[in-house]
Image (cartoon, helix red, strand yellow):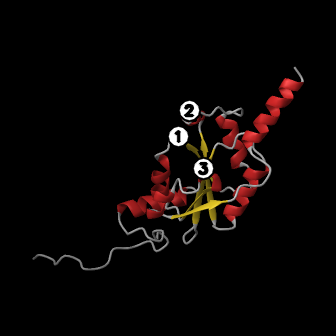
Amino acid sequence: MTTAPSTAMPMIDTALSAPVGMPPGPDALAQVRRRRAIGVRPGQSVAITYGTYDLFHVGHLRLFERIKQRCDFLIVAVSTDRFNAVKGKASIVPFEDRLAIVRSCRSVDHAIAEDGWDQKARDIAEYGIDLFVMGDDWAGKFDALTALCDVSYLPRTEGVSSSELKRRLAHCAESNA
């Protein structure tokens, strides 16, 4: 006597709903697990931003606060010293310290290392990012990512930048030499 194959629906964890726009499947399940592992709750919108965050200042803090007003969960990717060298930049504050500073910000829910230009598209897919945000000095540079999520460029905080702080420090050092 043979039994007919079961036509019953498999048990589904309804809390494992895929992010908007992600079709069900193994990638969606992996994405949901990754989101859960970092503390994203079902239904929360997730934003990501990238930067060096050297000589951390109020402009960085305000950027995180403004992004957090637009999402439920904020991921910040901090450029590694190796990646900054690829970009032709040198940081004053070492990567591990910059990462610790960013992680300590109230508006930041999760911080990761940024190791290369191509990482952005991978992060969007892996974390199910809803909103990609950069300062408006990058306007238009990441528009290709609109195929993966919403992209926004926010105005920089007036009167403050790490580059300007470095110039001021160099001037002070020259004046005191």
N-term-proximal mark, 1 vs 3 = 3
Mark pair 3, 2: CA separation: 15 Å
| Relative depth, front residue between 119 and 138 | 138
Q: Are marks 2 and 1 in contact (CB under 8 Å)?
A: yes
N-term-proximal mark, 3 vs 2 = 3
Which structural element holds mark 1? loop
| Side of 161 relative to 31 (left or right) | right
Q: Amino acid at mark 1?
A: Asp
- Residue sitting at x 63%, y 59%: 74
Q: Are marks 1 and 3 in contact (CB under 8 Å)?
A: no
Mark pair 2, 1: CA separation: 7 Å
The percent coordinates of residue 23 (x first, y second) are 38, 69
- For residue 171, above or below residue 58: above
Would you call the spot at circle 2 few (<14 residues within 10 Å), some (14-19), or many (20 or more)? some
Image quarter where the N terminus lies is: bottom left
The percent coordinates of residue 76 (x first, y second) are 62, 52
Can residue 107 be seen in this snapshot?
no
Q: Which residue is denoted by mark 1 in the rendering?
A: 115
| Numbered-mark total | 3
- Residue sitting at x 64%, y 42%: 52
| Side of 4 relative to 163 (left or right) | left
Q: Which residue is denoted by mark 3 in the rendering?
A: 50
Q: Which residue is denoted by mark 2 in the rendering?
A: 82
Which structural element holds mark 3? strand
Can residue 156 be seen in this snapshot?
yes
N-term-proximal mark, 2 vs 1 = 2
| Relative depth, front residue between 171 and 152 | 171
Quadrant of res 10: bottom left
- For residue 166, above or below residue 130: above
Q: Amino acid at mark 3?
A: Tyr
- Residue sitting at x 78%, y 46%: 57
